[in-house]
Every structure is written in structure tokens, then in C-alpha cells.
Image (spheres, rainbow, N blue to C red):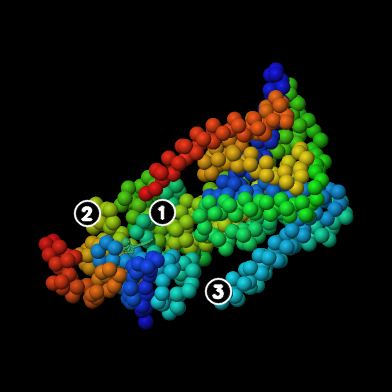
């Protein structure tokens, strides 16, 4: 059984339908990506999956129908979102941001300290800057903090909304390397990206979204060689 | 005016300023977490003083009836909303938090009314009876409109203040009260007599401000509240429940209002409607702090207190006029600088 299954989800803002009848699945231990141009409805899909905006359809996580649960209950189940806007607590220190990442956990301060140590060894930059305010970090460091903060919740499934948005190419490569390495810890990932090639190279399965609908899906290996995608999303494969 | 009088007036101003500090910090705290300008804050302060006076006179304070009514309303609303959400399993918890806990201190006061308890116990009971009122008001009035605009929340707050004044008249009657002083001591500092009550007020303001600072700096709950104030979406994504944060903010605000009410009870004559002006002066302090900064708020409230004290010396009937008209340019300046600070905040 899939860890996350989104079934026939639609999202509307007033009359405008941003997501139309989308279904997708993420299996345990899998990295799945949703690629598509700006305005395709990717962010709306993730935001509704975590319960922050109303939607029709059904969301099942870890065998439980979570469609009518509030966001906070979903987080407590190990379902996390790193949003497009990061939503860091910019006036608070890096350390406090990480600590709040563990707010939903009930397994005691020793376990939380151990997670903090793990996050610091994965992101040494965060350890160096742990007393600094989140708002003073560079773009790449902010994304690392957003990832680290989400990891502090010990999620089963991590949804990442355009983690490479606004980052320099060198840092983007670093972020994708980190995402690939997170996978080894057993966390499942739903990765939303406009950077289609890097996303498909990281994920094992992909969906392509356009104007609110899934238009293609398949294993990353087949999608990356699909001539229709090469023309529109993969820049003619010129890498 | 010689230096001696100026010193006395300043000290007097610092003492009333210290009370405004506590209330103003409460305004900022509640606003930061909930976006609600809790206009009835001063009413809570006044009701505390009135409750303490009733206990001192061996009367049953009107607050007991008020708490009972509010608790019953909040409980019914909570059960109704649990029923609509299909989560009736949470009813026992709702009964505990909305009915049983608020009614315990009220019940104790009801049972012991007519006996004069020791001062410390009277103060403790008064605070315990007052504490649930703001969180209950939050449940009844604000929670159903939690997503409303700041302006709508403000309008509702103003309406709530008038409702509270009405209830105050109903429950406490029109007479003004003043309790006995807690301390009977006068210190001479640099040749100026300083009343023990003033020292107590200042000491309490410093103590509780410091306690609040510790709470926000070193506890996870405090940090979660701070996080909610900074970024509501981010906080929800960490699993921090906004309504829980609001309840805690109101509870802390209630504590500050109750303490200020206890402190003001022996120094001012308090009527059922005295809260508004006390609240308004504190609110000015909060505005000087931009509704965000606790230290600037504290300094601002102190300035209001000192200004008021000098104004009262110069012309007692016009003291409020003097205070508020001198503050208008300050507020204009603040609102100008604040609008710009907010613009920069946008990402
Ligand atoms: N809060 C909103 N109110 C109204 N329309 C919105 C809102 N958020 C997104 N949209 C619209 O929904 C569509 C999908 O947006 P979004 O989900 O952000 O797409 P993506 O993340 O793929 O760029 C766009 O047309 C966008 O303009
Ligand atoms: Mg997006």
C-alpha cells in the first residue's frame, strides 16, 4: 500500500480551478517528483495535501484517511511540507527554528537532541550559525534550514516545494545531492520542481502537471527520454 | 515646582507607569499572537480590583457569576462545534478546560464568601477567579471569527468592551472601591519619601516582565507562541495549533491584567468602568512600542505614567486631556515610522 495517496483532488480559488481531479501516489522509501511550469497548480496541490487550503477529493496517509484532519494532526502523523516560501521564523535563531521543527514530537528531549546532532552533521553550516537569526542567512542556508527544520519532525514523508527556487546553480546541485542522500535515511519524498532534469535525475517516478492536470506520468528513466518532454521541459537534453 | 516636588511626581509617575507596563505588555502579547487588540483588557484589570475589594468587604464578588455564565457559554459552544466536526470523543477534555477548571476558583470564592481570609489568600483567589475570563471570552467571541481582518477583530473588541462595562455595572454596581494597602511602609530615598506600595508596584512590574522574558526565551511553549506571532503559516507547519497558542496568550494576558488590578486596587478608586481609561493609557504605551517591541513598550508606558503624574500636578481636571494631547504627535510619528517598517517586512 502506498504511503501517500492523493485521490481525485481538486482545488479552486473562487471560480478559477487551480488543480483538477489529480491523483498520485508515493510509496514507502520512494522519491516521486511533480514537474510542470509556473502556475500549473503544484503549490496548490501540496498546500491542499497538508490541509492548509480546502480541496475536494481524498487524501490517505499511512493507511489513514486524513481528508478531514486539521494540518497539525497531519504533521503529528509524520507528514511534512517544506513550503515554497520556506516560512522560517526569521527573527529567531537557527537553533530555535530547528527546535520548533520538533514541536510535534512526543519522544523526549534526548531523542530531539540526537536529531539536532544529525541535522548539524548533515548541514555543518547550520551548526556554525546556530546562534544567528534565520533572517540573516543566505538563500542556500535558508533552504538548508528549512530542510533541517522539517527533518527535526522525523517525518515519514517530506513534501518539498521547489527547493531550488531562487538558488544559484552550484547551490542547487548541493541541495539535490542532499535530497538524494536524505532518501538513504528511509524518508519518502514528494518533490515539486520546475528544474525538471535535476528532479527526474533524483526521483524514481515522475508526474508532469500542466494547467491543473496531470498530463504524463511514468518512471523517471522513461520520462527523461520522452521526446515530448525533452522539447518542453528538458531543454533538448543539452546537458 | 522645585526639585523635591519633581522627584515625588516622577516617582509617582513611575509607580502608575509600572502598572501601565504590565497591561501594555499584555496588549502586545495578545496582539502579536492573535492579531486581536483586546480592548476589554482594562476592564479585566478593573474587575480584579473590584473582586479583591468585594472579598475584603466579605461580599460575594460579581465575578463569580460572570465566570459561571462565560464558562457555560464556552462549554456549550465547544461541545456544539465538536459535535459538528464529529469528534465527540473530545467532550470530556472540553468539559475539563472550559467548565471544571474555570469553576473551581469561582466555587471556592462562592463557598468562602462571608469569611475574611488572609490577605495573601484573598489575592491568590482573586487572580484565580479572573484568570479564566479572557480565555473564555476568546472561545466565545473571537474563535468563531479567528480568520477575520484586524479591523473586524478590533470592532468586535470595542463592542466586547461595552458589553463588559455593562456586565460590570450589573455584577459590581456603580460604587467605587479602594482596598487597604498591602504594605505600611515608607522609605526615604535621597530625601524623598517613597511609599512601600510604589516600591511593590515597581518590583512586581520588573519581576513579572522578567518572568515573561524567561518564558519566551527558554521554554518550548514560549518559543511556539513567539513563532506563531512571527509566522502563523510556518508555525502551523510545525504542528503548533493557533487556537492553543491564542488560549495561552490570553491566559498570560489575563495574568498580567490580574496582577495590575491587584496592584492598582489600593492606590486608585476603581469603578466598574474605570478599566477603559487605564487600558487606553497602557495602549498608548503599546503603540509607542509599535505593538511588537516589549522593551520599547515598557519605556513608553513609563513615560505615559510620568507625563500623567506631572499633568495631574499642573491641572488635575485636565490631566487626561494633557496626557493624550501631548501624545498625539508621538503617535503620529510612531504610526508614520511603523507603516514603513511593515513595508520592509514583506518578502
Ligand atoms: N491564493 C490564491 N488565490 C487565487 N489564485 C491563486 C492562489 N494561489 C494560486 N493561485 C492560482 O492558481 C494557479 C496555480 O498556482 P500554483 O499552485 O501556485 O502553481 P505552481 O506552484 O505550479 O506555480 C495559478 O493560476 C495561480 O495564479
Ligand atoms: Mg509553486
10 Å crowding of disc 3: few (<14), some (14-19), many (20+): few
Above or below: residue B309 compared with residue B78: above
Q: Taking the image as four quarters, which one is ligand 2 found in? A: bottom left
User: Is label 2 in contact with label 3 (beta carbons under 8 Å)?
Assistant: no
Judging from the image, mark 3 belongs to the subunit labelled B
In the structure shown, which secondary structural element does the residue marked by tag 1 occupy?
A: loop
State if disc 3 and disc 1 touch (CB < 8 Å). no
Q: What quarter of the picture does the C terminus of chain A occupy?
A: bottom left
- Residue in the foreground of this view, choosing between A121 and A132: A132
Helix, strand or loop status at disc 2: helix
Give coordinates of residue B185: x percent, y percent: 80, 33
What number is the disc on residue B24? none
The answer, for residue B73, to whether it is visible in the render is yes
Q: Where is residue B49 in the image (x, y as percent from the top left)?
A: 75, 46
Q: Residue at x 34, y 76 (%)?
A: A21
The location of residue B248, given as percent across then percent down, is 60, 56
Discs 1, 3: same chain = no
Residue A88 disc label: 1
Mark 3 residue element: helix
Label 1 crowding class (10 Å Cα cut-off): few <14, some 14-19, many 20+? Answer: many
Q: Position of residue B338 (x, y in %)?
A: 47, 40
Q: Do tags 1 and 2 sit on the same chain?
A: yes
Q: Disc 1 versus disc 2: distance between alpha carbons?
A: 22 Å
Q: Distance between the residues labelled 1 and 3?
A: 31 Å
What residue does disc 2 label? A169
B142 lies left or right of A16: right
Write the residue at 45% across / 75% down.
A66
Q: Nearer the viewer, residue B236 or B49?
A: B49
Residue B74's place in the image compared with B44, above or below, is below
On screen, residue A24 versus residue A68, left or right, reads left
The quadrant of the image that shows the N terminus of chain A is bottom left
Amino acid at each position: 500500500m502506498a504511503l501517500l495517496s492523493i485521490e481525485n483532488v481538486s482545488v479552486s480559488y473562487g471560480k478559477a480551478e487551480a488543480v483538477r481531479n489529480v491523483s498520485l501516489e508515493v510509496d514507502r522509501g520512494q522519491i516521486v517528483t511533480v514537474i510542470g511550469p509556473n502556475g500549473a497548480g503544484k503549490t496548490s496541490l501540496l498546500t491542499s495535501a497538508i490541509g492548509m487550503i480546502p480541496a475536494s477529493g481524498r487524501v490517505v496517509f499511512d493507511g489513514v484517511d486524513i481528508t478531514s484532519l486539521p494540518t497539525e494532526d497531519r504533521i503529528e502523523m509524520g507528514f511534512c511540507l517544506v513550503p515554497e516560501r520556506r516560512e522560517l521564523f526569521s527573527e529567531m535563531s537557527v537553533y530555535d527554528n530547528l527546535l520548533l521543527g520538533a514541536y510535534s514530537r512526543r519522544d523526549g528531549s534526548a531523542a530531539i537532541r540526537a536529531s539536532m546532532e544529525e541535522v548539524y552533521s548533515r548541514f555543518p553550516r547550520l551548526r556554525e550559525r546556530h546562534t544567528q537569526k534565520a533572517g540573516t542567512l543566505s538563500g542556500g542556508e535558508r533552504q538548508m534550514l528549512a530542510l533541517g527544520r522539517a527533518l527535526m519532525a522525523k517525518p515519514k514523508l517530506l513534501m518539498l516545494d521547489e527547493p531550488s527556487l531562487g538558488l544559484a546553480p552550484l547551490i542547487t546541485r548541493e541541495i539535490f545531492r542532499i535530497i538524494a542522500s536524505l532518501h538513504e535515511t528511509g524518508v519518502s519524498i514528494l518533490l515539486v520542481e520546475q528544474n525538471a532534469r535535476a528532479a527526474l535525475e533524483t526521483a524514481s517516478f515522475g508526474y508532469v502537471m500542466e494547467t491543473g492536470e496531470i498530463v504524463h506520468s511514468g518512471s523517471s528513466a522513461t520520462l527523461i527520454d520522452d521526446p515530448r518532454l525533452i522539447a518542453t521541459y528538458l531543454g533538448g537534453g543539452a546537458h | 515646582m522645585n526639585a523635591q516636588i519633581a522627584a515625588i511626581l516622577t516617582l509617582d509617575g513611575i509607580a502608575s507607569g509600572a502598572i501601565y507596563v504590565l497591561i501594555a505588555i499584555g496588549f502586545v502579547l495578545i496582539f502579536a499572537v492573535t492579531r486581536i487588540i483586546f480592548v476589554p483588557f482594562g476592564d479585566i484589570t478593573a474587575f480584579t480590583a473590584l473582586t479583591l475589594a468585594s472579598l475584603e468587604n466579605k461580599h460575594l464578588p460579581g465575578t463569580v457569576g460572570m465566570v459561571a455564565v462565560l464558562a457555560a457559554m464556552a462549554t456549550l459552544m465547544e461541545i456544539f462545534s465538536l459535535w459538528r466536526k464529529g469528534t465527540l470523543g473530545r467532550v470530556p477534555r472540553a468539559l475539563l478546560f472550559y467548565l471544571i477548571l474555570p469553576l473551581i476558583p469561582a466555587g471556592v470564592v462562592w463557598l468562602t464568601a462571608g469569611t475574611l481570609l488572609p490577605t495573601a489568600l484573598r489575592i491568590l483567589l482573586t487572580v484565580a477567579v479572573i484568570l479564566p475570563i479572557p480565555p473564555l471570552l476568546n472561545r466565545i467571541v473571537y474563535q468563531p471569527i479567528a480568520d477575520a481582518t484586524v479591523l473586524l477583530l478590533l470592532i468586535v473588541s470595542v463592542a466586547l468592551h461595552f458589553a463588559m462595562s455593562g456586565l460590570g455595572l450589573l455584577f459590581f454596581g456603580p460604587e467605587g472601591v479602594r482596598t487597604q494597602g498591602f504594605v505600611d511602609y515608607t522609605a526615604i530615598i535621597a530625601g524623598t519619601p517613597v511609599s512601600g506600595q510604589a516600591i511593590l508596584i515597581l518590583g512586581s512590574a520588573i519581576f513579572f516582565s522578567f518572568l515573561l522574558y524567561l518564558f519566551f526565551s527558554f521554554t518550548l511553549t514560549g518559543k511556539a507562541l513567539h513563532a506563531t506571532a512571527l509566522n502563523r503559516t510556518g508555525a502551523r507547519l510545525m504542528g503548533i495549533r493557533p487556537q492553543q497558542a491564542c488560549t495561552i496568550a490570553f491566559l498570560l494576558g489575563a495574568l498580567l491584567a490580574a496582577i495590575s488590578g491587584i496592584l492598582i486596587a489600593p492606590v486608585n478608586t476603581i469603578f466598574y468602568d474605570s478599566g477603559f481609561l487605564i487600558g487606553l493609557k497602557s495602549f498608548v504605551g503599546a503603540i509607542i512600542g509599535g505593538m511588537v517591541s516589549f522593551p520599547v513598550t515598557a519605556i513608553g508606558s513609563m513615560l505615559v505614567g510620568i507625563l500623567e503624574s506631572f499633568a495631574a500636578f499642573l491641572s488635575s481636571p485636565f490631566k487626561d486631556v494633557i496626557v493624550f494631547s501631548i501624545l498625539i504627535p508621538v503617535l503620529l510619528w510612531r504610526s508614520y515610522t511603523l507603516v514603513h517598517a511593515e513595508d520592509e517586512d514583506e518578502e
